[in-house]
Amino acid sequence: MTQLTVKDHNRNAAGLTYIYPVISRRSGGLSIGINFNTNNACNWRCVYCQVPNLSLGAAPELDFALLEAELRFFLQDVLHGDFYDRFNMEPELRVIKDIAISGNGEPTSVKGFAKAIELIIRVTKQAKIPDPFQYVLITNGSLIHQADVQEGLTLFNKHNGQVWFKLDSATEAGRDLINHCALSLQKHTENLLISARLCSTWVQTCLLQFKSGQGLINATEQEAYLALLQQVSQQVTLQGVMLYSLARESLQPEANMIASVTEQQLNDFAQRIGQLGLTVKASL
Ligand code: SF4
């Protein structure tokens, strides 16, 4: 018998193309992951990324009919079938905590993003998942200026969805070092503002250190990050900040150049963010 554990983020665990179950450490139950990036392609290349064979690009053409069939099948299996028994899940974890649009790349890069969100919400509503459960979009935020993505976020917001928006550094140098993204800091900040105006938005930040001494852990980086958060939260309401470090090993070439921060470092920084009046969820 297979046992899903809190460390098991295997996208193939359920044998489906788009749907994968994860026991979420943060939420204490089952998270139903939806992966549009079946080609392991992302428009960023974060040094801590855990996607195997990550390539530069967008999600492939989405098979909407297959996504719908898989989501229907999977929800039926979890809610009325023997999914929990087959995976030998502990009784206290037998609850659907969220449906998370996440995966092996940037999910908003899929063509027809808003249509996919509409499909997911429609199928989920029909399955009648007991409350409370949450829709989550885990994104690097780089495509939120696009009309189709904004349409999806507006729909998400109507159903109490949340955006988890990546912000690992508030300097161009830090972003170059950590995220290898083409988007400027200014554009990224504008996208964060758009996200927060359209939908409940949490900032998600990976606090890591480079063995060379760089990273968000240094004083210049921390000041820039705090100043940016302050500037943003004067204009929009943020739900807060999720601060974490390297939970799992990076699959990028920089893997042996980076390290997790200590609990003390994480908590110290969380406290400084909290002083801005923001809610902070910190976990190593
Ligand atoms: S944005 Fe996410 S999927 Fe893309 S490279 Fe960074 S961690 Fe990996």
Image (cartoon, rainbow, N blue to C red):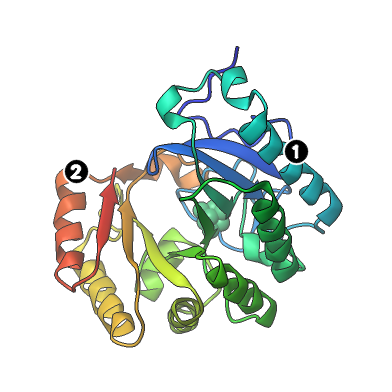
Left or right? Give the position of 150 relative to 226.
Answer: right
Quadrant containing ligand 1 reads bottom right
Query: Which residue is pictured at 59% across the width and 76% down the height?
Result: 154
Which image quadrant is residue 87 in? top right
Q: Point out which mark residue 263 bears.
A: 2
Q: Which amino acid, by three-letter code, is at mark 2? A: Glu
The location of residue 23, given as percent across then percent down, is 48, 34
SS for dot 2: helix
Dot in front, 1 or 2: 1
Quadrant containing the C terminus in the rendered view: top left
Check the image and name the residue furthest to the bottom.
Answer: 235
SS for dot 1: helix
Q: Point out which mark residue 162 bears.
A: none
Seen in the picture, residue 133 relative to 255 is either above or below; the reply is: below
Query: Which residue is pictured at 33% across the width and 47% down the height?
Result: 245
Q: Which of the two labelled residues, at mark 1 and mark 2, occupies the earlier sequence position?
A: 1
| Mark 2 neighbour class, 10 Å CA radius: few under 14, some 14 to 19, many 20 or more | some
Query: Which residue is pictured at 49% across the width and 74% down the height?
Result: 199
The location of residue 263, given as percent across then percent down, is 19, 43
| Front one among 65 and 227 | 65
Which residue is the site of mark 1? 73
Left or right? Give the position of 185 relative to 125.
Answer: left
Taking the image as drawn, is residue 36 in sight? no
Query: Which residue is pictured at 78% across the width and 50% down the height?
Result: 68
